[in-house]
Image (tube, coloured by chain):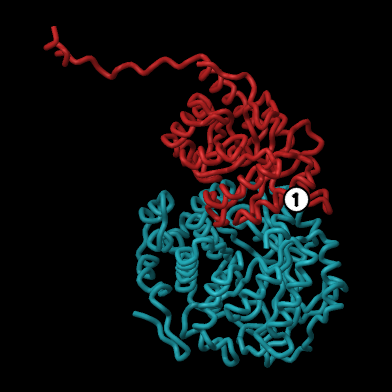
Amino acid sequence: MKTESKLTLGGVEFESRLLMGTGKFASSETMTRAIEAAGAQLVTVALRRFNPGQPSDDLLGPLRNLKITLAPNTSGARNADEAVRAAMLCRELSGSRFVKVEIHPNPHHLMPDPIETYAASKTLVKEGFIVLPYMPADPVLAKRLEDVGCAAVMPLGSAIGTGHGLATAEMLRLIIEGSSVPVIVDAGLRAPSEAAAAMEMGCGAVLVNSAIAAARDPVAMAAAFAAAVKAGYAARGAGLMSRSAEAVATSPLTSFLT
Amino acid sequence: MKRTGNIGTIPDWLNPEPWLDVVRTADEASVRRALDAASLHEEEFAALVSPAAADLLEALAQRALERTRTHFGRTIAFYVPLYLSNYCSGGCIYCGFASDRRHARRRLEPADMLREFEAIKAMGFEEILLLTGERTPRADYAYVRDAVAEAARHFASVTVEAFPMTADEYRGLADAGCVGVTLYQETYDPVQYSRLHRWGPKRDYANRLEAPARVLGARVRFAGLGALLGISEPFFDILALYRHARYLQRRFWQAGLTISFPRVCPQEGGFVPPYPVSNRQLAQFVFAFRIAMPDVPLTLSTRESETFRDGIAGVGISKMSIASRTTVGGYETRNESPDGQFHVNDDRNVAAFCAALKAKGLEPVFKNWDKLFR
C-alpha cells in the first residue's frame, strides 16, 4: 500500500514518527538525551510542569534548547473549559500552535473524558490551534474529532502508564480503517515490539513516555523504540504477506461442485 | 462483630472485621497469589499486610518498586507543611497541640503569613499544606479560608489539613483555591477513638469519618486519608483505611486520593504508643498500599528518619515533605522552638534531601500542578 514518507500534522511535516512524553524521568538530562536518542521531533510537556521561576524544576526550559516542536498538554484539566484555558496559556508560554488535549477527570487512572475532549477540541481548532486529542479508542469519537478539524487522533493503546500494550487493538483497527487524519497511538505501550505492531497496523505515529522513562536504561530504550517505529512503518509500506490457512481439509468442502 | 464505642459504631462499608481473620490465617501461598493478582480486593490486601507477608517483604518491595516506577516514574513530588495556628479545642491524648498542653498558643496573622509564604517560596516549594488544630474561635473556618485564598496567590497548589467542615465550607475552600484536604481519622476503631479523644468536637467520630466524602462532594480535587499508626490496633486500622479509600473511589468517580502513613514513635514526648509499629511493618503497609492502589500518591512526612525515608522513596512512597517546621510558622525565622506538633526526625535541608534523592536516581518535583486547575 502507498505510504507517505513524512508525518504531516496541521501542515507541519515531521521525519520522525515517534513522539515523546517528558514526565517520569530521573533528571532533565536523561530526558533530553532520551529525546535525542529517539530522534523525536514532536514532544509533549505538561503545563503543570512548567516552572520558569525555578529553572532546576522546569521542564519547558531544557526542551527549548532542543531542535524539536513542542506540543504542550493540558494534563490536570478535568473539563473542556479548563483545557481551553490551559491551551491558551501553553501557547502563550511555549509559542507553539500545537496542543495535546488531555482531559482526565479521574487523577488516578487518567482515562480521557470523551465528551469534554470533543468540546475542547472543537473550540481549540476554531482558536487556530493544531489539535491533537488524547482519546479513548472509540471509532465514532475519532471521526467526530476529525470532523471538527483535529490534526490527528490519539487513541490509547491501554491505560496510561500500565504497559498493557495494544489492549484496544480491535478498536484501533476500526479507527485506522476509517480515519483521514493520522492515528497516533498514545499511552499504554511497554515494548518496542508493540510500537512496531501499531505501525504495522497503519498508525501514523506512536507517542511513548513511561516505557522509555521507566526502563532500566531510558536512553537505550528510546533508541530501541525509534528503530521499532521505523521497522513497523517500513513493514507496513512493504506490505505484509497474508496469513496462510491453518490446515487444508482432506475432503474439500467444495468437492460436490465438480 | 462490629465495634461500637460510646461515640459511635463503625459502619458496614468500613468495618474491617471480616478480613482480620485473613490477616491471621494468611500463608505464603495466599500472599503470593495476592502479589500476582490482576485486581486486588480486601482479601488480597489483607494477605499483603499479614504477618505471613512480613516474611516476603523483599518480594513486596520489588513489586511496589515496579508499580511506583510505572505510575510515578523516577520522581518524588514535594510538599511543605505550614502550621497556621496551634490553638486547639481538642483533647487528643497523643498530640503536642492538645488543649491541655501548656505551651504558648499562637496563630499567624496575615502579615506573618506573607513572610512565611515568601520564605517557603524561596526554598522552591510550589505545593503548600496549611494546618490548624481543631476548630476554635481563634482559628475558625473564615481564618482557614482566607489563608487559602492568600496562599493560592503564591503557590501552584494549596492543600489544607484542619478540622472537619461542612459541605458548604469545603465548597468555599475550593473556591478560594484549595486543591486538596487531608483529614486523618487517626483510628477507625470507635472504642479506641473514644479513649484517645478525650473532649472537644473531635469526639464526633462519625462527623470526622464522613468529612472526606464531603470534601470530594464539594469538588475539592484530592482527599487525603490516613491512620495515625501506633495509637490503635494496626491491622484493624490499615484494613479500614483501605476500605475507606475504596469506598470513596466507588462513591466519587472523579475522586483524587492521597494516603499518608503518620506514625507515633515511642521516644516522642510523654505519650507511649500502645501499639508501636516497627519500621518493617510500616514499610510493609506502604508496599501493600502501593501494590493494591498503584496509581494513588502515597506520602511520607519528616516524622520518619533520614534512613527510612531515603530507603522507601520511590519504593512505594511517591510524595514527601522536607525541611518541615511543625511549629506555628518558623520558615521565616528558622526558630528552633521545641514546641512543634511532633518531632521532626529528618531535619535535612532541601538541598541535602534533593542530593540524596538524586543519588538514588530520583528527581524531586516541586511543581506538578498549575494555578489554572482550580
Which element carries disc 1, helix, strand or loop? Answer: helix
Q: Do we see residue B15 in this rendering?
A: yes
- Chain letter, red in picture: A
- Which subunit holds the residue at mark 1? A
Residue A210 location in percent, x, y?
Answer: 60, 41
A206 or B1, which lies in front? A206
Residue B95 location in percent, x, y?
Answer: 65, 83
Residue at figure coordinates x 77%, y 78% from the top left: B327
Residue at figure coordinates x 70%, y 52% from the top left: A86
- A221 vs B7, left or right, is right
A243 or A119, which lies in front? A119
Find disc 1 in the rendering and name its residue: A89
B280 or B133, which lies in front? B133
Residue at figure coordinates x 70%, y 61% from the top left: B306
A143 or B365, which lies in front? A143
Q: Do we see residue B312 in this rendering?
A: no
Residue at figure coordinates x 60%, y 56% from the top left: A79
- B338 vs A2, left or right, is right
Please identify the quadrant where the C terminus of chain A is shown: top left
Q: Compared to B179, does B172 lie above or below?
A: below
Q: Compared to A11, does B108 lie above or below?
A: below
Q: Residue furthest left?
A: A256
Say what amino acid the circle numbered 1 marks. Leu
Residue A177 location in percent, x, y?
Answer: 46, 29
Q: Residue furthest top?
A: A258
Residue A28 location in percent, x, y?
Answer: 75, 42
- Chain letter, cyan in picture: B
Characterize the local packing of mark 1: few (<14), some (14-19) or many (20 or more) Cα atoms within 10 angstroms: some
